[in-house]
Image: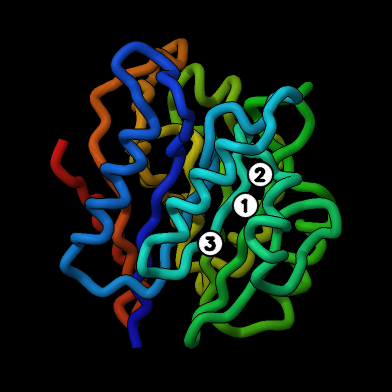
Amino acid sequence: MSVRFLHITDTHWSASSIAAGIDPAERLAQLCDWIRAIPAPIDWIVHTGDVVHRGHISEDDGASTRQAIAQLQSLPYPIHFVVGNHDHRRLWPELLGGLPGVPLSSERWAYHFVFGSERLVVLDGRDTLAIDPAGRLDDAQLQNLETLLRFTREPVSVFLHYPPLPLDCDWIDRTMLLSNGRELHALLAAHANRIRGVFFGHVHRPVTQVCQGVLYASAGSSTMLFPNLPNDAAAVTQPDAKPMANYVTLGDSGTLIKAVWGPG
């Protein structure tokens, strides 16, 4: 039986504009309206981080996180959330009712669960402000993931915010990667025949990469786009985003990813 999920990311919700021509509250509303109208089966949704724009600052009171998560939870599908570098992680246990799976770390929003015949793994790379906007997995996640891969047999999909491997873009590869992404990749490559894919966000555009038999795929942001060509040197905000997602099918034929857009 096939599993079908919608991969969204980087909504950066804020009650006020965050850049010229970008109203993230309006864009999240457009995204949710579009998702409700998608004429295709969806088993669940995953949001790979940066639900809100200012949740990471010390002055944040959590109001934006409460509003954005409530809006996303109003969708007619179960939804899983991955911590991004802009998110207010301390609020998530209260708002989401605790981890919806088996913990992979006592310090992070990281867990695994089974849906049908598939095992899904959510990782949390949010580390200190000293390395932001790069990320890092804590040792517990890597150790527990290694054990999980060794002693389970289901096909595995992995979800996190940060790209684990370089993406041939100057500013992304300098500033945005998972600092121990090579270590994560080595774990996954050792079980490449079981890895459905590694699904991430953070770069605001859909990118697909295959390395040593492991598929990596990001979704695009419905709020704002970033440049990602080799010589791009900075995260210049591009306001021409549309409601977008990756529609992912996991089945007997492998992993199928369809980048889909709504009107806008």
Any part of residue 108 in sight: yes
Residue sitting at x 84%, y 52%: 107
Looking at the picture, the colour scheme in use is rainbow
Query: Does residue 118 sit above or below 135 in this rendering?
Result: below
Label 3 packing within 10 angstroms: few (<14), some (14-19), many (20+): some
Q: In the picture, residue 147 is in which quadrant?
A: bottom right
Query: What amino acid is found at the position of numbered circle 3 in the picture?
Result: His
Location of residue 114 in the rendering, given as x and y in whole percent from the top left corner: 57, 80
For mark 3, what is the residue? 80
Query: What amino acid is found at the position of numbered circle 1 in the picture?
Result: His
For mark 1, what is the residue? 185
* Helix, strand or loop at mark 1: helix
Residue sitting at x 24%, y 57%: 258
Relative placement, left or right, of 123 versus 8 is right
* Helix, strand or loop at mark 2: helix
* Helix, strand or loop at mark 3: strand
Query: Foreground residue, 118 or 59?
Result: 59
For mark 2, what is the residue? 182
Q: Earlier in the sequence, mark 3 or mark 2?
A: 3
